[in-house]
Image (spheres, rainbow, N blue to C red):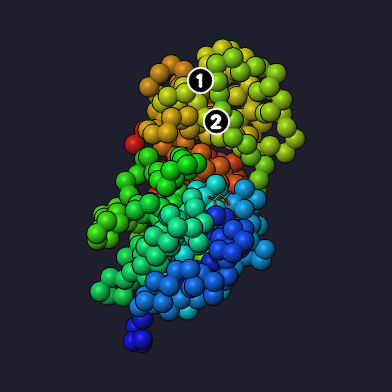
Amino acid sequence: MAASTPSVLLIYTGGTIGMIENPETGALENFDFERLLKYVPELKRFNCHLSAEQFDPPIDSSDMEPRYWAKLVEIISANYDRVDGFVILHGTDTMAYTASALSFMLENLSKPVILTGSQLPIGMLRTDGKENLITSIEIAAAKNPDGTAIVPEVCIFFENHLMRGNRTTKINAENFNAFRSFNYPPLARAGIHLKYEPSRIRHSDATKPLKPHYLFDTNVVILTLFPGIQESIISSLLHVPGLKAVVLKTFGSGNAPQKPWFIKQLKDATDRGIILVNITQCSSGAVEMERYETGIQLLQAGVISGYDSTPECAVTKLMFLLGHGLSNQEIREKMNSCLIGEITKTAL
Ligand code: ASP
């Protein structure tokens, strides 16, 4: 291989993609790199140096936690100067949370970090894992003529779409198109050609070194409103000892009941220093708190807008900011700022 041959590190955390069906027993067994090469011989044809690391033991992504995100960031920063890009093989269930968290943890990222997985194990005949893996490696290795990465972002690649990681949500437990990025268009599509959309791709200042972050504070909760929600339940939740922030999933463009007790519970919580972030229950679109009286009341109660954030992104961003010992005001300001392409700032 030429000296300029790109190199990619595969990091296997667990999940369906790395399960290989033993052809003799039919049982699902966990991945190792040698076995992967056996089942995906196409990998040997890549003009690319591949190396691999794996979680031991691999985990189902339902068990994913901030300490595993920190482990991923440790692996990425330890290999950062050695390779051109990273592919993280991850269970689909919480992949959108991991992608969101990593986007905040890897400050000044100038290399691709592509998360992928599959709905069917890689050893199965109809697996979607092979295609997802092969194209993810291609994206992780892709460079511009000047040697810089084409996609220096944390992304999810799934079923022909490359999406900004902190914009994604898992939407399907059955079909191969398991992920969507409702509020930001894909960064690339894979058809006969891999078509990148350069204007949608975010670039950090490449002169700055990678700055890894590891800290999270998990004293947060996501609260979905519904008609009939009870005062005693809201009150108990907002008085949980240690609670620091709530992602409030409201109706439509950021609306909530106008009942005086409800607004008072929220106002009392913000007065006690709890940060309340308003995002919509709708899959697509943004919160506009100034649009209806119901939203204005939330603003007056001190609730801040989460704009068009996904729940996965809002909650990981809060945990990340809280983990860094910022003041309440600083966190409110940063929740209202687009740090790494995670929100579209058009409305309150
Ligand atoms: N339960 C698995 C996981 O998220 C499902 C998958 O990999 O798709 O780890």
**How far across and down, in percent of the image, does residue 31 sit?**
57, 66
Amino acid on which disc 2 is placed: Leu
Q: Is residue 337 left or right of residue 270?
A: left
Q: Which image quarter holds the C terminus? A: top left
Marks 2 and 1, Cα distance to the nearest angstrom?
A: 9 Å
- Under circle 2, the secondary element is strand
Position of residue 242 in the picture relative to residue 178 (left or right): right
Circle 2/circle 1 CB separation < 8 Å: yes
> Quick check: 337 above or below 122?
above
Numbered label attached to residue 137: none
| Residue at the spot 52% in from the left edge and 14% down from the top edge | 258
**27 or 285, which is in the foreground?**
27
Q: Residues within 10 Å of mark 1 (few under 14, many from 20)?
A: many
**Where residue 289 appears, x then y in whole percent?**
43, 26
Q: What residue sits right under mark 2 in the picture?
A: 248
Residue 284 appears anywhere in the view: yes
Q: Viewed as shown, does residue 236 lie left or right of 257?
A: right
Q: Residue at x 41, y 37 (%)?
A: 308
Q: Is mark 2 within 8 Å of ligand 1?
A: no
Spot occupied by residue 292 in the image (x, y as percentages of width and height): 40, 18
Residue at screen point 68% across, 28% down: 237
Residue corresponding to mark 1: 256
What type is the residue that disc 1 sits on? Answer: Ala
